Amino acid sequence: MRSPQNLFPETVMRQIVNPRIFTTFALLLAIGSTRAIMPIAAFAQAADPLPPVPTVEVGDPIERVLESGLMSNAADGKFHAERVISRAELATILVDTFNLEQRVTGNNEVVPLKDVPKSHWAYGKIQTVLRTKTMTGYYPGEFYPNQRINRAEAMAIFANAYGVFQFPTETIDRVLAMYPDADQIPTWARKSMATALYEQFVNLDNGGLIKPLEPMTRGDMAYVLSQYLTRLDQTAPLPWSSEEFPQNN
């Protein structure tokens, strides 16, 4: 049986695979399944089942997002990091960050909304997030564009747009168990939040608290985006070395 590093040489994988996709592939191997390329027991002896993501060192998040154009200052020239993000603002940020217009293929059907007329400043972006199912309305025909969004909702939605890792339940539990207030995360958001936390998109307080039910601020969003932008600049690390695998001839 050939070992994974022979099947997928590191140099080849780094050239042909998007860093995020490669990280997902590495995670699936690292977590293991009954269909893994090599036996689970052999891999468990070779590496930790959940390889750590290298710590991301970034500069000032606000400066980073302003330079990228993903967020901008208010009319008064200030960023106002303390202000809460609305659903309409989040929709706009997601469309611009992930180029969601490119995901809308052959679907030009207008989603009727009672509370978002065509004259609304974010009408087009909101239509895009609905068509791509990146976000959904609360009730049929209502998006609630001005409603404030909490941290769990915003970060889970961001993770969904980014691509949620298909962690098994035990791995999700393991990731979330590291945070004292993880029990406050809504059940529907646990898998997405596990991805966001694993990828270090979440700004924690000094006590390691997620504060999932607190409002999502512009400062919070700047942190998420700066981490994401830094991830894009990195080459995805291998969670193993070639010496860790037994050679089967």
Image (spheres, rainbow, N blue to C red):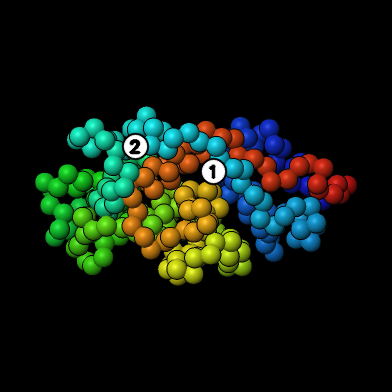
Q: Residue 26: x percent and y percent?
A: 64, 48
Residue 68 seen in the figure: no
For residue 70, the mark is 2
> In the rendered image of this protein, does residue 189 appear above or below residue 161?
below
In the image, 165 versus 105, the foreground residue is: 165
In the image, 118 versus 146, the foreground residue is: 146
Local SS, label 2: loop
Residue mark closest to the camera, 1 vs 2: 2
Query: Amino acid type of disc 2?
Result: Leu
Q: Residue at x 38, y 57 (%)?
A: 151
Q: Residue 126: x percent and y percent?
A: 25, 50
Sort mark 2 into few (<14), some (14-19) or many (20+) by Cα contacts within 10 Å.
some
In the image, 25 versus 244, the foreground residue is: 244
Q: Residue 27: x percent and y percent?
A: 63, 52
> In the rendered image of this protein, does residue 48 appear above or below residue 241?
below
The residue tagged 1 is: 20
Q: Residue at x 69, y 37 (%)?
A: 10
Query: Amino acid type of disc 1?
Result: Arg
**What residue occupies the far top of the structure in this picture?**
67
Q: Quadrant of residue 155?
A: bottom left
